[in-house]
Amino acid sequence: MPEVLKAPLVVEFPFTRSVGPVQSAFLTGLRERVVLGVRTSDGRTLVPPVEYDPVTAEEIRDLVEVAPTGTVTTWAWNHAPRRDQPLDTPFAWALVRLDGADTALLHALDAPGPDAVHTGMRVRVRWAGERTGAITDIACFEPYDDAPKDSGPDDGSPAEPAHHTGRFEDPITGIVAAARLDYTYSPGRAQTAYINALAEQRNVGERCPSCRKVYVPPRGACPTCGVATLEQVEVGPGGTVTTFCIVNIKAKNLDIEVPYVYAHIALDGADLALHARIGGIPYDQVRMGLRVEPVWTQGSRFPDHYRPTGEPDADYDTYRELL
């Protein structure tokens, strides 16, 4: 059996969202080294703040300032930090209930080792040197020995929650969060054979032993009958455009000028349409039933695009079941 392929893949995109008045005050407060919570009608103080009471679902807007010191309620040691985590050396993920709050905030705790961390330990916020109005304005928490009771607070922070207007200059109104997923993809036996055949400028599918349909690309099992497909069938190279769309927005890192056409193409001998770009013809002349063939570039493992063959258009009845 040929070696099954695998490759690292990254899915990444920026997620942009607006923030309401409560989250705006919280994030802007972090920029100003102020930690805000929200007080519910029954007197609980929630940090981080939310806009609706998780118990009663009523809207809550009563903002209060809590202390940047607190107590670890539970924790887990992170032996191997990953990319973009708060610290690049081993640290603890900790739930910290800030003084004056009734709920805990999840963040990193910088400690020399797991033996130095325990539930109930006192910690304080370590502020980031440059703050932009994000949770990362809290660089991490660090161990903190409370000052003697008669000396008073050492940082001017309120010991009890104090009402706060939530008003700051230049408030944060929106955030951009980078969403990213790194993983190793393995196409499996069936698609490995399909990809290897493409490298030889061939298209192969697999036939279902029950319904006898040929699926391209193959999945290793028939989606209709649910049985394994093992019989390889070479299809194409030509095919028929079944449906298509005109792309008018240029994709990042894709060197194709818009507008262009992406289409579902039923290869000759296949019972499932695959999708590919149509070239060699003005975008407004692409149509259902258009007969096309693959265009390969030197060294490519897959067709660059499909172009018209010059044959008469296929009759609708020959591909209507593949729409």
Image (cartoon, helix red, strand yellow):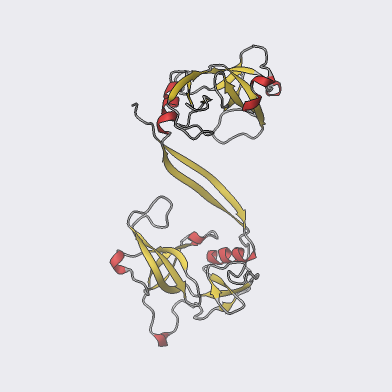
Q: Quadrant of the N terminus?
A: top left
Q: Position of residue 189 (x, y in %)?
A: 40, 30
Q: Residue at x 71, y 23 (%)?
A: 284
Q: How many marks?
A: 0
Q: Position of residue 160 (x, y in %)?
A: 52, 81
Q: Give 318 or 180, whichever is nearer the viewer.
A: 318
- Vertically, is 255 above or below 99? above
Does residue 44 appear left or right of residue 188 in this picture?
right
Does residue 240 appear left or right of residue 183 in this picture?
right
Q: Give 169 or 57, whichever is nearer the viewer.
A: 57
- Vertically, is 13 above or below 162? above
Does residue 255 appear left or right of residue 10 in this picture?
right
Does residue 171 appear left or right of residue 220 in this picture?
right
- Vertically, is 129 above or below 309? below
Q: Position of residue 169 (x, y in %)?
A: 63, 65
Query: Which image quadrant for residue 274?
Result: top right
Q: Residue at x 51, y 68 (%)?
A: 33
Q: Residue at x 68, y 17 (%)?
A: 315
Q: Give 249 or 145, whichever is nearer the viewer.
A: 249
Q: Give 208 or 286, whichever is nearer the viewer.
A: 208
Residue 180 appears in the figure: yes
